Image (cartoon, grey):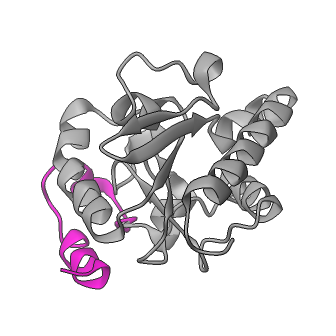
Amino acid sequence: MDLLTLKQECVNCTRCGLAKTRTNVVFGTGVANAEVMFVGEGPGQSEDEQGLPFVGRSGQLLDCYLQTIGLCRDKNIFIANIVKCRPPNNRDPLAEEWDACLPWLREQFRIIQPKIVVCLGRIAAQRMIRPDFSVSKEHGTWTEKNGVLFTATLHPAALLRSPQRKPEAFEDFVAIREKIHEVCTHTY
């Protein structure tokens, strides 16, 4: 199966209650052979409206950070979320919603085969790195799982609420760039 086929299946998903309230499934965006994958928790209002991840204000900030380290969602990365539909009122996804969406994310991983995964925020880090991961204390650290390097950084929406933390996130992105040069084969 390829990403396009997977996306066609995903847009018809009704595995959890989020299917009833969504405008669009937010499958993900980027290149199918990306060595670097960014994963957030779930779509917000702008993402639900457009069907694309990180397109609101936080997405604009993310794009700025990506650009500074030579990454671009349509050239060399893939961006997805733990859940593919917006939780009402932007609440945290429920465990049953994570579980319902996990097969989609696993299949995205199988197809893309990233070497580096960057978790954007607490929810993604606790779901993908370990349940007690503290983004505020452990952001920028690296964990290897099944040959894939995982790190987490502060969620762009959190940076909009606490702009004094932007330098910390920038340091994380610089470290991500260094790790890409160390382990990835594509030219970035």
Q: Is residue 139 above or below residue 181?
A: above
Measuring 47% from the left and 41% from the top, which residue is drawn there? Answer: 150
Q: Nearer the viewer, residue 171 or 51?
A: 171
Image location of residue 5, percent across then percent down: 22, 83
User: How many callouts does the rendering have?
Assistant: 0
The image quadrant that residue 180 belongs to is bottom right
Q: Residue furthest left?
A: 15
Q: Nearer the viewer, residue 19 or 145?
A: 145
Image location of residue 167, percent across then percent down: 85, 34
Magenta stretch holds residue 18: yes
Give the side of residue 116 with respect to residue 55, left or right.
Answer: left
Measuring 67% from the left and 33% from the top, which residue is drawn there? Answer: 158
Q: Is residue 80 above or below residue 134?
A: below
Q: Is residue 144 above or below residue 47?
A: above
The image quadrant that residue 95 belongs to is top left
Location of the N terminus by quadrant is bottom left
Location of the C terminus by quadrant is bottom right
Residue 41 in view, yes or no:
no
Give the side of residue 151 with respect to residue 88, left or right.
Answer: right
Image location of residue 14, percent across then percent down: 14, 60
Magenta stretch holds residue 122: no
Q: Nearer the viewer, residue 77 or 120?
A: 77
Q: Is residue 34 above or below residue 135?
A: below
Q: Nearer the viewer, residue 20 or 105?
A: 105
Measuring 82% from the left and 60% from the top, which residue is drawn there? Answer: 68
Measuring 29% from the left and 56% from the top, which residue is drawn there? Answer: 105
Q: Which residues are magenta?
A: 1-26
Residue 4 in view, yes or no:
yes
